Amino acid sequence: MSKQKRQTVAGVIGAVVFGSDQGLVGQFNDVVSEYSIKTLTALPGKSQVWVVGERVHAPLQDASLPIAGLFSVPNSVKGITPLIGQILVKYEEQCKQGEVVELYLFYNRPTSGAVYAPVSQRLLPLDENWCRTLTELPWPTKNLPEIMGSGTATLRALIRGYLFVSLFRACAESLASENASRLAAMQRADKNIDELLEDLNRAFHRMRQSRIDEELFDVISGFETLSTEKTH
């Protein structure tokens, strides 16, 4: 995550942590939970965490982070949209009470050099440098946009869309990382099975050859004994 200008404000720091509900993912949940705990405990103020995935819930709870909600990991891309809707509803409920003043995301992102890496993103308040960069971008056409309704309502709609897209991308990348981790684990298991089969085959051939050698030695010994008796 790029460095952002952060002001210390009084209030609760909200965080959404994406984990996994499935097995065969190695250290997937441990990596993102340790990264989340380290980051949140270093921030001033109280934290409130919404967790996606039962397996990442336990380490966060053991670290004494207040868990505001637990959601199931979607089984497919179609399940991401309903999940994000539920998270936004819970977040907006806390915002109406005036508690949550910041919002962070924590999830595993696929990487080229490794299977995945934990990342974080501060969604709110909006970064000043990021906002300034957007305002300085030239409009792509000569037709300037028009605001429908009040400016406040439009801004709220844009922020909600920004939150939805950011959460959707984080969930999708987390699912991709989870599947990549599971695939890597299955490939390692398949390789271990092949190596074990090779070892077992070699051991079987050694034992079989040893039995054959023993039988041949018995036959030869018996033949030599009979030959000796006949000569006498």
Image (cartoon, rainbow, N blue to C red):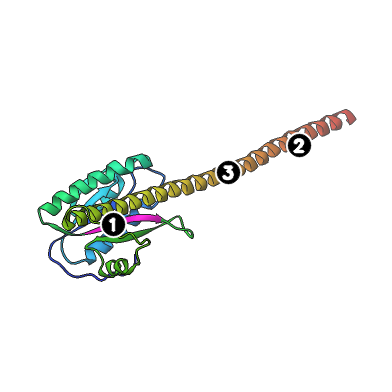
Answer with mark 2 or mark 1, whichever residue precedes in sequence: 1
Q: Return the residue found at the far left.
A: 97
Look at 59% across and 41% down and name the residue there. Answer: 197
Is 100 on the left-hand or right-hand side of 135? Answer: left
What range is drawn magenta here?
103-109
Q: Nearer the viewer, mark 3 or mark 1?
A: 1
Q: CA distance from mark 2 to mark 1?
A: 73 Å
Q: Nearer the viewer, mark 2 or mark 1?
A: 1
Look at 37% across and 51% down and name the residue there. Answer: 174
Q: Is residue 64 visible?
A: no
Q: Which secondary structure, mark 1?
A: strand
Say few, some or many: other residues with alpha carbon within 10 Å of mark 2 (under 14 / 14 to 19 / 20 or more): few
Say few, some or many: other residues with alpha carbon within 10 Å of mark 3 (under 14 / 14 to 19 / 20 or more): few
Q: Which mark is residue 194?
A: 3
Per the image, the residue denoted by label 2 is: 217
Q: Amino acid at mark 1?
A: Leu
Quarter the N terminus occupies: bottom left
Is 208 on the left-hand or right-hand side of 223? Answer: left
Where residue 209 appears, x then y in whole percent? 70, 38
Q: CA distance from mark 3 to mark 2?
A: 34 Å
Answer with mark 3 or mark 2, whichever residue precedes in sequence: 3
Q: Is residue 150 visible?
A: yes
Question: Based on the displayed image, in which of its 4 quarters is residue 136 positioned?
Answer: bottom left
Q: CA distance from mark 3 to mark 1?
A: 40 Å
